[in-house]
């Protein structure tokens, strides 16, 4: 099964299909994010500050588009990229491809890489220059996201061509029996004409059987490819009122998970799961939670103090293979929170534990946060400074800064190892991505690839450069909006030990739009 291959087990589930079927179907992709499996990274490749964007092909096998931008002043002598499968490593990888300079773009280099099989990959980027050599791993999931569409014109042309060949072949059968042994100018006899008609009928029947067999084979290939289109693990989410408050439970009830056809989970930022809640409809409620594992299939977290309503649930997890995915669900939270305690097995009162890094906020409804400055609950101002006019599928930098009420720069504190976390969602929920200043990549997956090659814990975070607490008042996130439409950007920063959340609304235009 494809799911086994995606989880990293050594099975033939990620086999290469000989051809790709016909129809383009937009699906809600739940790979590492929702709506796009592209990967964005910004950090260090040894001494070189770089930004890497991997645009995945959407079909497997397929060509991924890689861009590497040098964000410093260095001019490299050579930049290479190569795809590394999680179960193959560098020794089992193909030779590296050279990234070529993009004309008219200083410091930008591009290459294409074939992703041949399904599963967890990493793009190994190597930069060589006067400062020496630096490398970095950029994790990416190789998944099938869609079926390619055959245009109406192409379909009509192929049908007409096939009909022409069929009629031509049947005509040749008849001519061969009717006239091939006659002398020039000799007319065929009635007997030969009858034999020709019989030959045309038999030959046409044989061709029809062959065409039917080909159509059936094509249908089986199409069905097999449909099975390989990635879907996140199926889950069920519920909110239950208890004496200690409302508890949110997310259960993974997918047969693939219950059948142990996925590798186990590993922590990212010290958490097995990063869950995001977004209030459906008006987007006025937001939470970044870290549920505890109740058993092998369930995760539990106290529901935060947010308004009642339906909530979209996005839960990021990372598998041992390095494959990361976002579980997607919805949950109705119309049970009021109850203050107090719940009695434990021995009759003693016990509180429901909450992760100290959990955070949530009640925000303006969608469409009311269109200004580039957002006043936080503490009175500080979080300003959106760059990337305020984004275009679909264009590289952009979402840059933000925080200032005290008197206008002096604020001192950002690390929040789970990062100076900021952001979440970008399309208002209809078809896109959701969790970002941090290092990009959209999952750092646990990156560490897994680095550890596999370096064999030491010192490599696990080598690509990250974390500013010291108080050394920065601004952050930036590399990003590419995958589709046009209205979006909301949630930005989280930690100040004086408290996580505060801002919201910004923006409409993403088509390329060249206004």
Image: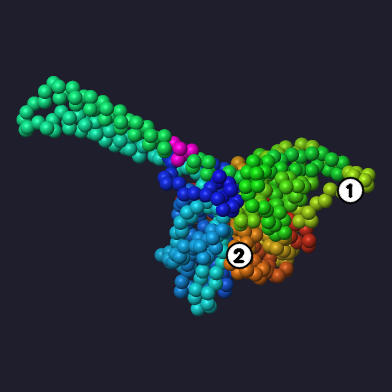
On the image, which quarter does residue 212 sit in?
top left
Q: State if disc 2 and disc 1 touch (CB < 8 Å).
A: no
Q: Whole-Å distance between the Cαs marked 1 and 2?
A: 42 Å
Quick check: 175 above or below 49?
above
| 10 Å crowding of disc 2: few (<14), some (14-19), many (20+) | some
Residue 230 appears anywhere in the view:
no
Quick check: 108 above or below 180?
below
Per the image, the residue denoted by label 2 is 452
Q: Which residue, as the protein is rendered here, is positioned at the far right?
A: 347
Task: Determine the secondary structure under disc 2.
Answer: helix
**x and y percent of residue 356 in the render?**
79, 56
Q: Quadrant location of the N terminus?
A: top right
Residue range in magenta is 219-223
Question: Which residue is depicted at the point 45% across and 61% down?
Answer: 111
Q: Earlier in the sequence, mark 1 or mark 2?
A: 1
Does the magenta-highlighted stretch encompass residue 258? no
On the image, which quarter does residue 470 sit in?
bottom right
**x and y percent of residue 118 in the render?**
52, 51
- Circle nearer the viewer, 1 or 2: 2
Question: Which residue is depicted at the point 76% across and 56% down?
Answer: 357
**x and y percent of residue 186 in the render?**
6, 28
Question: Which residue is depicted at the point 46% across and 56% down?
Answer: 114
**x and y percent of residue 60 in the render?**
48, 50
The dot on residue 350 is 1
Is residue 48 or residue 295 the one in the foreground? 295
Would you say the magenta stretch is mainly helix, strand or loop? helix
Q: Which residue, as the protein is rendered here, is positioned at the far top?
A: 190
| 10 Å crowding of disc 1: few (<14), some (14-19), many (20+) | few
Question: Which residue is depicted at the point 86% across and 44% down?
Answer: 244
Taking 188 as reference, is 206 left or right? right
The dot on residue 19 is none
Is residue 93 or residue 98 the one in the foreground? 93
């Amino acid at each position: 099964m494809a799911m086994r291959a995606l989880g990293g087990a050594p099975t033939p589930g990620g086999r290469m299909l000989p051809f790709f079927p016909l129809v383009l179907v937009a699906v809600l992709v739940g790979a590492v994010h929702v709506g796009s499996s592209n990967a964005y990274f910004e950090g260090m490749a040894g001494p070189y500050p770089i930004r890497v964007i991997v645009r995945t092909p959407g079909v497997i096998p397929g060509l991924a588009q890689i861009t590497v931008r040098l964000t410093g002043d260095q001019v490299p002598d050579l930049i290479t990229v190569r795809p590394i499968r999680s179960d193959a490593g560098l020794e089992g990888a193909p030779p590296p491809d050279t990234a070529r300079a993009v004309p008219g773009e200083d410091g930008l280099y591009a290459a294409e890489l074939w992703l041949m099989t399904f599963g967890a990959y990493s793009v190994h980027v190597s930069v060589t220059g006067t400062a020496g050599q630096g490398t970095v791993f950029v994790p990416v999931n190789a998944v099938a996201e869609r079926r390619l569409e055959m245009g109406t014109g192409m379909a009509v042309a192929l049908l007409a061509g096939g009909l022409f060949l069929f009629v031509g072949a049947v005509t040749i059968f008849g001519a061969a029996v009717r006239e091939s042994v006659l002398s020039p100018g000799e007319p065929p006899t009635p007997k030969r004409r009858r034999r020709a008609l019989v030959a045309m009928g038999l030959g046409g029947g044989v061709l029809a059987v062959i065409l039917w067999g080909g159509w059936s084979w094509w249908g089986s290939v199409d069905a097999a490819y449909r099975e390989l289109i990635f879907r996140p693990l199926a889950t069920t989410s519920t909110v239950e009122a208890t004496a200690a408050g409302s508890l949110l439970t997310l259960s993974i009830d997918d047969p693939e998970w219950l059948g142990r056809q996925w590798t186990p989970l590993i922590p990212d930022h010290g958490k097995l799961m990063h869950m995001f809640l977004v209030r459906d409809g008006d987007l006025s409620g937001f939470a970044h939670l870290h549920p505890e594992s109740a058993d092998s299939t369930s995760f539990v977290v106290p529901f935060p103090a947010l308004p009642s309503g339906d909530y979209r649930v996005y839960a990021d997890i990372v598998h041992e293979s390095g494959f990361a995915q976002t579980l997607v669900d919805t949950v109705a939270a119309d049970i009021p929170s109850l203050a107090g305690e719940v009695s434990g097995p021995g009759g003693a009162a016990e509180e429901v534990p909450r992760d100290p890094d959990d955070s949530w906020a009640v925000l303006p409804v969608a469409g009311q946060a269109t200004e580039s400055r957002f006043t936080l609950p503490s009175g500080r101002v979080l300003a959106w400074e760059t990337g305020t006019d984004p275009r679909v599928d264009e590289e952009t930098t979402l840059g933000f800064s925080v200032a005290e009420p008197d206008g002096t720069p604020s001192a950002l504190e690390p929040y789970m190892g990062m100076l900021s976390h952001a979440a970008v969602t399309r208002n209809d929920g078809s896109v959701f991505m969790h970002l941090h200043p290092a990009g959209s990549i999952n750092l646990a997956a990156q560490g897994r690839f680095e550890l596999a090659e370096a064999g030491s814990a010192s490599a696990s975070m080598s690509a990250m450069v974390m500013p010291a607490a108080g050394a920065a008042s601004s952050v930036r996130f590399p990003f590419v909006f995958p589709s046009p439409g209205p979006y909301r950007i949630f930005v989280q920063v930690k100040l004086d030990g408290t996580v505060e959340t801002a919201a910004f609304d923006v409409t993403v235009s088509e390329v060249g739009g206004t």
